[in-house]
Image (tube, helix red, strand yellow):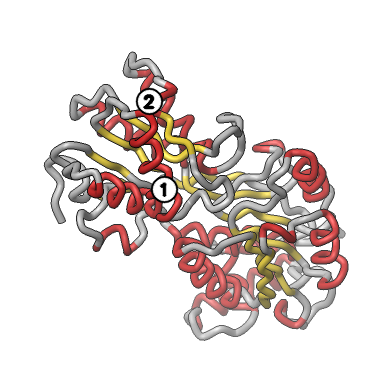
Amino acid sequence: MPTVSIKKVADKCGVSVSTVSRAMNNRSEVSPETRERILSVADELGYVPNANARGLKISDLQTVSVVIQGRTSELLIEILGHLQKSLSTLGLDVFLQHVPDEEVSLQTLTQMITERRPAGVVFLGRFGATDSGSGDEINRAIEDFKVPVIFCTATPAAGPKSRHSAISVDDLSGIKTLTNLLIDRGHTRIAFGVAQKGVALEGQDIWATRFRGYREALEEAGLELDPELIIPATDNVDIYSAATGYASVTNWLESTNPDFTAIVTSCDAVGLGTVRALRDRELRIPEDIEITAFDGLELSEYAIPSLTTIVQPLEKIAAASAEIIFDAVTNPEHTPTWHLVEGAVRLGESTQGSSR
């Protein structure tokens, strides 16, 4: 007899997978009426609470590894809190692993799987080596993983054809929205910052995806992409930081003396560094230069000036990631999924006509 999945129970009850899990684990968040209905449907369908044994809680058997590479950021810390809460609610134990950039290797990746033997892996953000040779090797190894994987706030190198799941904000669409906002205000000389120096602009990195959104918005508006308006990063590794944003924009201004009226920055942190770099040159924001950012971090809302940005629905992304990996480790019929979640524009003081 084929195994009945938890998703089938959830679908028949008209509730989420997480609600079924809470009911099965006798969690207080589920009302007695809902729990009774779920247990009745589960019994009717012959659902076994986990893939290995009837009557055991999922938390007794399943541990998920959450992996963060390199320098942590405010965004990763915030989404990690949401993710841990969601996984715990589903009855999954969490083992957090931080891997410094210099220790990323095929051997490290193999050890993570063979030593901990997790039921699933959540890559929180990117994971991979900085050089293309070993990076390709790691990407192939991840694709060959026998355990379920989800990339949270990032995308696998194999793209939508990956054997694993992914969920992130729609970076391309979000940056197009921000670029169009500036175009609608009459800007034709819009810079983008920052881009990794010497790295292909067609890569899978978040900044590269956002760059493509910027480029597409220009093309659709009939504006020519000027290579001089692409701001190269002074640090290819620590590319999403205020320090890199400040140093990169400062170096760009001093070395090229560019003609521009607005900047689309790759993230809030880079946007904050950009604000400081422009102010050090006595440029007024937004009167002289308008700036947009991306991520919607709390800090960007209370900065002076506050940033016009795309707010990522981090709690929604974390909850969806937890449910996907939960289904993957408990449902033999699980199919990997690819989700792009829309962000929302939050107008700030870094663009004209915006206020708190």
Provide residue 12's location: percent of width, then percent of height: 59, 59
Graded by Cα atoms within 10 Å as few (under 14), some (14 to 19) or many (20 or more), the crowding at tag 2 reads many
Which quadrant is home to the N terminus?
A: bottom right
**Mark 2 residue type:** Ala
- Dividing the picture into quadrants, the one containing residue 18 is bottom right
- Provide residue 251's location: percent of width, then percent of height: 40, 40
The reply to whether residue 208 is visible in this rendering is: yes
Q: Which image quarter holds the C terminus?
A: bottom left
Left or right: residue 210 compared with residue 217 = right
> Residue beneath label 1, please?
247
SS under mark 1 = helix
Residue 248 image point, x, y percent: 42, 43
Q: Residue furthest front?
A: 255
Q: 294 or 15: nearer the eye?
A: 294
Q: Nearer the viewer, mark 2 or mark 1?
A: 1
Q: Residue at x 61, y 38 (%)?
A: 204
Q: Nearer the viewer, residue 73 or 258?
A: 258
- Count neighbours of disc 1 (C-alpha within 10 A) and say few if under 14, some if 14 to 19, many if 20 or more: some
- Residue 196: image quadrant is top right
Badge 1 amino acid: Ala
Looking at the picture, how far across and down is residue 275, in whole percent? 28, 49
Q: Is label 2 in a helix, a strand or a loop?
A: helix
Determine which residue is flagged by label 2. Answer: 217
